[in-house]
Amino acid sequence: MLRRQPMKHKWYGYTGRHIRIDLTNKKIDIEENNPEIMTSYVGARGIGIKYLSDEMDPQADALSEENKFIFATGPLTGFPPAGNRCYVVTKSPLTGGIANSSVGGYFGVELKLAGYDFIIIEGKSEKPVYIWIDNEHVEIRNAEHLWGKGTEETEKMVLAETDSYAHVAEIGPAGENMARVANVITGGVTAARAAGRGGHGAVLGSKLVKAVAVRGTRGIQVSDPKAFKSSYWKFMDYWKNPTPTCVKGLSDHGTISVVAWANDLGILPTRNFQTGVNENASKISGELFEQKYSIKKGAQPGKACFACPAACSRMGRVDDPGFEGASEGPEYESVASMGSVTGMDNLALVMKAIRMCNDIGVDTISTGVTFGCAMELFEKGYLPEKDAGYDLKFGNGEAMLDLIPKIGRREDFGRLLGEGSYRLAEHYGHPELSMTVKKQEFPNYDPRGVKGQALAYATNNRGADHCRAEVNCSEMFECTMLGYWSPEKDVDPLAIEGKAAMTKHYQDYAAWAFDSVGMCYFLLMEALEQDLADYLESVTGLDFGGLDGLMKAGERIFTLDRLFNLKAGLTGKDDTLPDRFLKEPMPEGPIKGQVVELDIMLPEYYKLRSWDEQGVPGSDKLQELGLET
Amino acid sequence: MSKYYIDIHPEKCTACRICELACSLHHHGEINPAKSRIKVNIFHEDFFFYPNVCSQCEDAWCVNICPNAALSKDRITGVVSVDEARCVGCRMCIQACPFGAMGFDSEKGISENCDLCGGDPECVKSCFYGALEFKRLETAVADRGRNFAQKLKLPHVEEATHEA
């Protein structure tokens, strides 16, 4: 049969190729991208779910050989402003559904500079390995000498063996031992950036992949450099003249400043979400950090990821006895989880705990919330002291510091902690004390005070999570994103009217814009949708169908995630929140008495999505999105 | 005509490397830090970031060492430039420059150096926090003195007020 040769496509923004690494057969293939898939799924998260759902059985065990692991960049990874994201996509050992997580720093950019848009890792190695990508040269290397090492040491050793200007993504002991809260780290502890949520580290660990190191010197092409330059400056002006409030806040104070902000709103999760008001907030706050531990004094930009104007990362040094150390960070989610959910009152201790988490390679959100869960189980008498090994009351920081390395080694009580809070609470017969959706721990905005975000928590495909629909940005922070908030038009965080539409819109927008083009959403929060769509088309020279086409792509990506979950065995029943948020009124503070009226919002949301009452997408919708099977 | 140069303030650098991106885009039409003539040196452990670029020396090591007179300093603009036709790619200028500021274009096989983008440097325009400034030499020198003097001003005034 005569087959038409596919036309060689010239790629801009994208590099046009990807690597497939078959660990079982030690086979490495460089494959060309399919232009049609790229325009339908944009990149990063979209490409990840497309390849995953095409190539694997969603019912396969996440920690089995059948699971695949994808590192994927977007077409704007490498581009200003803040085009630095790399996505990791796999089936989650924590939720049993789709897991996608994004990491900043320089790793994703380096991968593109080496000439690849994404890497698909499949099968399972016989012995520990790491992958070394040096432009055209791709190699599977022995990593037996790295096995068991923390992320900081792994990073240093891999750089020494490969190229001092390479960038490395690695797992710590927690990933090797397949703790379900294990993550993927780039930059070691000193410059830690994490693809945190969903247990990606455990999947790499199950495949015996310790690290991926990349060095790239080949460049990313732009369709029309002259035209690009003018659209680039137009886009950049958005952040410079004048810098929007959100970006200025991030730049001057970092995300850790949100501790005080969330506490003032009464939604700072405290002692396993029992309340949203923390009397010790000032002891773990951004103000205290700036006074005592910040290397740069006062309000100043910190350290940036590639091409980012916000530079939100802080740089902290602790000299307090027992907690000495220096690293980038801390950021809000880590401090709130490891500090407020656990009832700590010592920022130096919390910063040490975060550094330790980064070294063993566990997600600080899941780990902190799991500690919070264990502490509540302990205080309520459900978790015996002989099991915990410690007097595990809220605020027992010494016990937490002792237990973190045990999560990595999966020793004693650390083994259960590494399973995440749902499995821990279930083990002791009280799953209602696990603050999770789809078995993934909540990030740190109490849903009772941000109702739109509450609906997003319940319906996001990767479980409780704030990044796949940042409704709270408009509810809390006066972000102009998507036009929902403006100085004239406030968004009432406690209202439920219109929140279903808002959540759907944010989820679809996030799916293509925040998660698939490869730029950091902290910057995109203040951009206009149309500007981003124009920018994307001018860089790539591809026709995505304009903003309408891209919003459709977003809905397609979100729905494909949903289909993956449904095939994996999750159902509409999993679109819910713990009873604490549905039935226990907030006991105190500005939102005293609030619960989440999910029973009103959820049916409205399903209807907007054209899903049936069980949360299954209708065939008309699937046909419209080109997802019919 | 006054001489201009790129004045570097490492304390303001956030290591975002957007200058590398802007430089490679301008000179090579692609995003490629490996082809940038300005390079951000990142010392994570010390939280120190230094964007390194040619300072257009008066009596330049690179110009002096070049065996084929491919490098020259423009008497009017002060820019040290590479004559592509004369450069043989011997890399001696790279060895000679004590600051490691000389670059090399592997594809063409010749040295390349910052040309201040003809008087409107892209790296400076792209820098968000003023870590790079394009300044008349005399102004740069005066500003540095003035910035130092500024630091003396406040305590001095406070002290005087206190005494009164």
Image: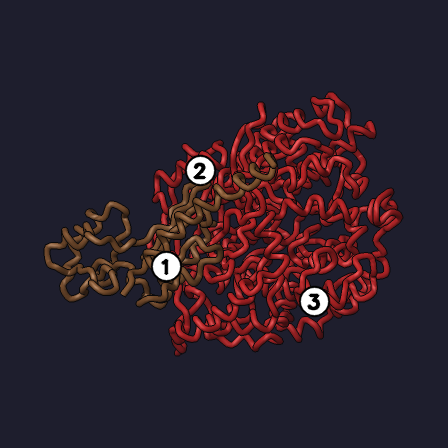
Q: Which amino acid does label 3 sit on?
A: His
Residue, x 27% and y 48% (percent of image)?
Answer: B100
Badge 2 sits on which subunit?
Answer: B
Q: Nearer the viewer, residue A219 or A176?
A: A219
Looking at the picture, does residue B117 appear above or below residue A194? Answer: below
The image quarter containing residue A256 is: top right
Q: Which of marks 2 and 3 is in front?
A: 2
Q: Residues within 10 Å of mark 3 (few under 14, many from 20)?
A: some
Name the one closer to the observer, A625 or A531. A531
Q: Which chain carries label 1?
A: B
A74 sits to left or right of B118 = right
Disc 1 versus disc 3: nearer the observer: 1
Residue B25 placement (x, y as % from top left): 37, 65
Q: In this rendering, do the residues under marks 2 and 3 share a single chain?
A: no
Provide residue B138's location: percent of width, then percent of height.
33, 56
The N terminus of chain B lies in quadrant: bottom left
Callout 2, which amino acid? Answer: Asp
Q: Which residue lies furthest to the left in this view?
A: B67
Q: Quadrant for residue A336, please give it.
A: top right
- Which label belongs to residue B46? 2
Please give the residue where the numbered disc 3 appears in the rendered image: A505
The mark that comes first in sequence, 1 or 2, is 2
Name the spot of residue A126 as percent of width and height, x first: 45, 40
Q: Chain B: what color?
A: brown
Regarding mark 2 in the picture, which secondary structure is present there? helix
Which chain is home to disc 3?
A
